[in-house]
Image (spheres, helix red, strand yellow):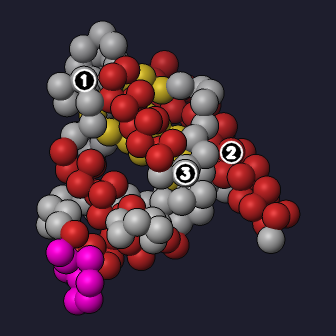
Amino acid sequence: MPDSLHCRIVEIADLPLYDPDLDNDPRPEPWVRFRREIAEADGVLFVTPEYNRSIPGALKNAIDVGSRPYGKSVFSKKPAAIVTASPGSLGGFGCNHHLRQCCVFLDMPTMQQPEAYLSNISDEKFGRDGAILDESLAKLLGKLGQAYAGWVDLITAGRAGLA
């Protein structure tokens, strides 16, 4: 990733299932933390596996937690990019496009190119520490990181110009 792009993993595993009855205070602490972390970010880079040609349930829950109640979404206007992965040959194509549909509703300007469908994901492509071992994968993700840094700059500069 370029030096100008500072990435942080926002944890979603501890989020209770979204329930509109919990939208009023006091909200579950993990919801409050998640919403704060997304609100503080300049953009959102979604990196996710594909499950059954769609997004994982935990990610859908995180989207629901961050986008509700209506009119109070922490995702709105955040520049987004999407990386999907699958052990199959399609690289998470179905998941990628379902997530893009979500981003349209969430009002997240989503980077269109380069697309990142990581196919045939296996232990040979990553070390136990998460390091990328596959040179072509490293190049693709480096290119995506450069493009996303530019995308975030473009969208945030455009927002500042409208203020």
Q: Nearer the viewer, residue 155 or 140?
A: 155
Judged left or right of residue 21, residue 141 is: right
3D distance between C-alphas at marks 3 and 1: 23 Å
Is residue 51 something that shows in the picture?
Answer: yes
Secondary structure of residue under mark 2:
helix
Describe the element under mark 3 as helix, strand or loop: loop
Question: Circle 3 is placed at which residue position?
Answer: 107
Q: Does 118 sit above or below residue 131? A: above
Please state the extent of the stretch shown in magenta in the rendering. Answer: 21-29
Query: What's under tag 1, amino acid-wise?
Result: Arg
Q: Is residue 12 left or right of residue 154?
A: left
For disc 2, the marked residue is 151
Q: Residue at x 44, y 36 (%)?
A: 101
Q: Residue at x 60, y 30 (%)?
A: 112
The total number of labels drawn is 3
Where residue 102 sits in the image (x, y, percent)? 41, 42
Identified by mark 3, the residue type is: Asp
The secondary structure that most of the magenta stretch takes on is: loop
- Return the disc, 3 or 1, that comes first in the chain's sequence: 1
- In the picture shown, does residue 11 fall above or below 113? below
Residue 148 quadrant: top right
Q: Please say if 107 is above or below 8.
A: above
Classify mark 3: residues with Cα within 10 Å, few (<14), some (14-19) or many (20+): some
Element type where label 1 sits in the image = loop
Residue 115 in the figure: left or right of residue 84: right
Q: Mark 1 or mark 2: name the one nearer the start of the chain.
A: 1
Q: Which x, y percent locates residue 42?
A: 59, 62
**What residue is pinned by disc 1?**
53
> Looking at the image, which is closer to me, 162 or 30?
162
Q: Amino acid at mark 2?
A: Trp
